[in-house]
Image (cartoon, helix red, strand yellow):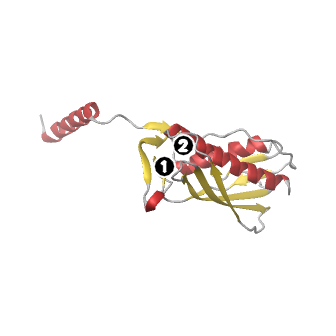
Amino acid sequence: MNTPRRAVILGFAALALSRCTGSPPPALYTLAAVPGEPRRSRRLGIELHRIGVAGYLDRPEIVRSTQAFRLQLAEADHWGEPFAGMLDRVMVENLVRRLPDAAVFAESGAISTRADLVLEIDIQRLDAESDGSMVLLAQVALRPDGKTATATTRRITVPAAGTTTQAHVASMSAALGQLADYIATQIAAM
């Protein structure tokens, strides 16, 4: 057998052996949209720009907290899709539930149309305090038809739903739902 072929076969054998003795694959999680109160608004096209995400959050592993200047990760628990894209998807769904008269679409999606309102969100924090409560710190800007807007900062705290990763992710989803409630209220008042 020639040497390159032998190396390939040995490589596959080593890979197969490592899968037999290695650690189990990570559990995969996803954020989910949560129910919210529908609000009446005029018919609008709302374009959600790609949500800005603090770098420490944009990773495959789920960040549990940032206490004492240290990231605590759920090492065996990963996101089932890229974090930033998941945020866009969930926020669009949250807003669609809250603004039934509006057409909400993500800038990063396949559909593009004229937007009456541009929504920009920058998530600076989304992790748990030492007591387990979830903290979301975000800046939000609404720009009507390309005009300039002033950003507002929202800090949302959701009580701990439990100590499991599933409860942690549920609290994150609830915090994003509360942010969508705030945004929908602002849009309905315009």
User: Which kind of residue does numbered mark 1 sit on?
Assistant: Arg
Of the 4 image quadrants, the one containing the C terminus is bottom right
Pick the residue in front: 44 or 151: 151
Left or right relative to 48: residue 38:
right
Toward the top, the furthest residue is: 20
Q: Residue 127 at what x, y percent from top left?
A: 54, 52
Visible in this render: residue 111?
A: no
Query: Of helix, strand and loop, which one carries label 1?
Result: strand
Crowd rating for badge 1 (residues with CA inside 10 Å; few <14, some 14–19, many 20+): many
> Disc 1 designates what residue?
64
Which residue sits at x=48%, y=49%? 64
Left or right relative to 15: residue 66:
right
Toward the front, the furthest residue is: 131
Left or right relative to 187: residue 14:
left
Q: Residue 101 at what x, y percent from top left?
A: 83, 44
Of the 4 image quadrants, the one containing the N terminus is top left
> Disc 2 designates what residue?
168
Which residue sits at x=49%, y=38%? 164
Left or right relative to 45: residue 72:
left
Query: Of helix, strand and loop, which one carries label 2?
Result: helix
User: Which kind of residue does numbered mark 2 sit on?
Assistant: His
Tell me whether circle 1 and circle 2 mark residues in contact (CB < 8 Å): yes
Say which mark, if any, is on residue 166: none
Q: Residue 122 at what x, y percent from top left?
A: 62, 60
